[in-house]
Amino acid sequence: MTPRVPAVNPTEMPTKNRPANDGASMNDHTSRLEGVAKVTGRATYSRDTYLPDMLHACFVRCPYGAGMLVSRDEAAAKAVPGVVEVLIRSEQGQYHGQPIGHVVAETELAMKRGLRALNARWKAEDVETTIEGAMGDVPEANGHTQRLLGEAAHVLEATYETEVQTHSSFETHGAVVDHRGDEATAYVSTQGTFAARDGLGQALGLPESKFEVICEHIGGGFGSKLNGPGKEGVVAAQLSAKFGKPVRLFVDRAEDHLDTGNRPSSRSVVRIGFDGDGTIRGGQIQTYGGVGVARGGGGVRFPSGRYELGEIQREHEDVRFNGGPPRAFRAPGCPQGAFVEELMLDEVATLAGVDPLDLRAGGRQARREAGIFEQVLLQLVCHDLAEIAAD
């Protein structure tokens, strides 16, 4: 039987995977209402917005982990046909990609030519880009923790690290802002139109009732587009208010990785005491988050609370160095913590000579006493792991 396909806003579309979904939901045949528009290219993203008489803007960025701007030719940049403004706000860069000014032009080509004609020359400075290089000494365990570790049959001492992860959204970060004197419209690539609105009022010089934020579709964000309009939207708003014209400021792919936030790096120093059967008695967990030039946001969710780890002396420190600041990225702090916790449990199981799944389940006795749901779940996990190993 051929599925019914409504003429407008189709919710039932033919697809090969529908039989696998039978009985999984109240309406197994519901399709994404915007699906057709997206796959056919009709969907409009903020980055697709081009308005009449629009200006184009880009950032002047520091090319080093730390550097000093020693010379530039603003006169040459301003002499490029179509260039409207060249502004340098600072001569010091604290991380690779940090904006220290901007170029505004009537066309994108003129903007790029103006940036090149600026001929900014930098002197690289000493730089620190790692947690290990910027952190202090690991605190000593307190007396209670030292006694606990001394009484344990085994002690695992380990250091675990995770690297920075950068966002790579299909649509890069940016905005088009159209200031029309007593009102304005901002086309922002954002996961939160209200958050973008809250961050634009001062830049526009207008009350919230006098401007509108539009984001019809968004090409990904993963958390990086939740906390307001970003520096791109703010600068676009300021420039639009200044010149009375629409201003477009969208970063390119390289800039998106350089300076739109990240999942921060982490370092976890662990001293865990455990018995011969793998029962964990507790210990010391010291975590560090690499927050770059920011003052926070480097949390590591470890321990997670999923496992019984005994008495834990837990401390955390955010470490600053020459790097861009962190930004929300799908379950902040959780991937770093999960990586560390699961590795630690595997090492404890290996040293104790016990099965890693039994250790996570709380021992064989806990498995025998578990309810039917937990037993079935463990059996499925073991079966899946066995199939993966066989492949």
Image (tube, rainbow, N blue to C red):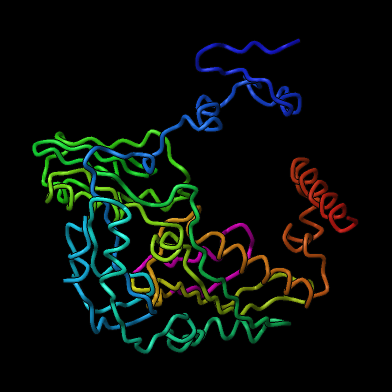
**Nearest the eye: 99 or 263:** 99
In the figure, 130 relative to 368: above or below? below
Q: Quadrant of the C terminus?
A: bottom right
Q: Residue at x 23, y 77 (%)?
A: 72
| Magenta highlight range | 294-316
Whether residue 24 is in magenta: the answer is no
Whether residue 303 is in magenta: the answer is yes
- Spot the residue most to the right: 390
Q: Residue at x 75, y 64 (%)?
A: 359
**Nearest the eye: 131 or 62:** 62
Magenta segment's dominant SS is loop
Is residue 233 toward the left or the right of residue 12 in the image? Answer: left
Q: Residue at x 24, y 61 (%)?
A: 103
Image location (x, y in percent) of residue 234: 23, 53
- Spot the residue most to the left: 182
In the figure, 262 relative to 181: above or below? below
